[in-house]
Each structure stands twice: as structure tokens, then as C-alpha cells.
Amino acid sequence: MDNLTSGRRIAYPSRNLDPVPGHDLVVLKRGGKDGLKIRALLRPGEHLQKSLRDRRSSLVGYVVKHEERLRHRFSRSYKTAGQMGALILDFAIDFEVSDPVLLVLSLDSDPLRRLEGEVDTLIRSAVSRASEPGFGEEVSSVLDSHVAEVRSFALALGLKVRNVSRLSSGAASRELGIHGSPAEPTVQSERLDIRDLRGAGGIRPDYDYKALRTEDPHES
């Protein structure tokens, strides 16, 4: 299964460690037995200052979208009590990247797909008991009561969820989290170029990135 987080260009491997407009750059360094260490976290427009110890082959970069209004849409099918067929619901998650380093360290687990799964699990556990006439109200009630859990789940992956929406068949949707203030879709899906994956390498999930975010490039 393709990595959804990389495929939607939220976070993906860098080809040459050059800055990308509107994106952060997380640079990791291969450290032998210690795996990958955080070399630098560069904000949009910042360039990596390389030291004499840095070999190009030892550095791995990841581009992370730096934008406050991101929207991810997905669909799931459900079957209510007594229903013969499946009912398809469309959802939207409005979010931003809260911690680029944590997102990169979680990238192998595909945070965006895991977030989809978290929402789907909450809905599926409730709608199986709902009748068709009350299906829509049941879905909205579940999202309202569990939106804090979704936000907490996302933060552990480096994402900050602002709203979770159940989209109607038309343009309108019921937003959760900021009532009466619809979020604006601002992100289009982009396909991942397979060349972006070359030289990506693995990531140690247990690495304490908070203890060492950036190495001193001038250190001897």
C-alpha cells in the first residue's frame, strides 16, 4: 500500500537537500550503529550549513509542508442496522503539521492514513447500531464527542487537527471543533515521484529527537 502522507506531499524525501518554497526541511544524518540522528530542522528559505564532517551520502533530507490550512478528504462505506446495501460517507480533516521532526520520524507508519483509520474506527463502532433514519445524526454526535481524542492522536504523529467534517453530497459540510466557522480547503493532492524515494533509508522510531534537534555544523 502506498504511503499516503508522502503521496499527498505532506512529508516526503528530498532529492538534494535544497530548500523548497513553502516547506520545512528535516535533515537526518546516518550515524552507524545509532541509526539516524537529527542534523537540522530548516524553516522555509533556510539553507543547510554543511561541516567538513558531513559527507553527502551520510545526510538524508525530508521535505515537510509548512502551511496552516491543509485539508485531507477521504471516503468510507458503512452499513447501518437493517440496511441491505452500503452507505458511503465523505469526510474532511483540516490540519497542519505541528512538529516536522516528529512527523518525519513517524513517516514509515503513514500518519495521514493512521488518522483516517482513527476517524473510521470511531464512526464504525457507533453506526453499526444506528438505524438508517438516524444515521447522519449518529455520525455527527460521535465526531462531536470524540474530536478531542482525534486531536490527541494526531499530535503524537506530529499533526495538529483543527476540524473534522462529515461532508454532505453538496458543497456544505458540518464542521467540528470551530462551530460556525467553516474551514477552507487549501491543498490539492500531488502524486509522489518515485525518484523522491531513492536513498531515503530507515528511521529509528525510538530516537529522542527533542533532546537533539540540531547538531552544530562547526563542531570539529
Image: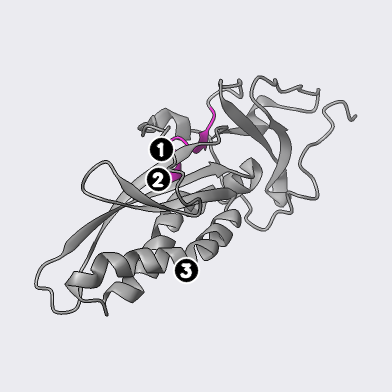
Q: Mark 2 points at which residue?
A: 4
Q: Which callout, 3 or 2, points at the residue further toward the start of the chain?
A: 2
Quadrant where the C terminus is found in the figure: top right
CB within 8 Å, label 1 to label 3: no
CB within 8 Å, label 2 to label 1: yes
Give the camera-side residue of 207 and 101: 101
Q: Residue at 49% across / 62% down in the picture? A: 147
Q: Where in the figure is residue 2, as x and y percent of width and height?
A: 36, 46
Q: Name the residue under label 1.
A: 8
Q: Distance between the residues labelled 1 and 3?
A: 28 Å
Residue 59 lies in the magenta-colored region: no
Residue 145 marker: 3
Q: What residue type is labelled 3?
A: Ser
Q: Where in the figure is residue 175, as x and y percent of width and height?
A: 41, 51
Q: What residue type is labelled 2?
A: Leu
Is 33 rendered above or below residue 214? below
Q: What residue type is labelled 1?
A: Arg
Magenta stretch?
Answer: 4-14
- Label tally: 3
Q: What element carries label 3?
A: helix
Q: Residue at 21% across / 48% down in the picture? A: 169
Is 155 rendered above or below residue 127? above
Q: Distance between the residues labelled 2 and 1?
A: 6 Å
Q: Determine whether, in the image, residue 128 is placed left or right of residue 86.
A: right
Which class describes the residues within 10 Å of circle 2: few (<14), some (14-19), or many (20+)? some
Residue placed farthest to the left in the image?
Answer: 84
Give the camera-side residue of 139 and 7: 139
Question: Can you tell which quarter of the image residue 219 is in?
Answer: top right
Residue 5 lies in the magenta-colored region: yes
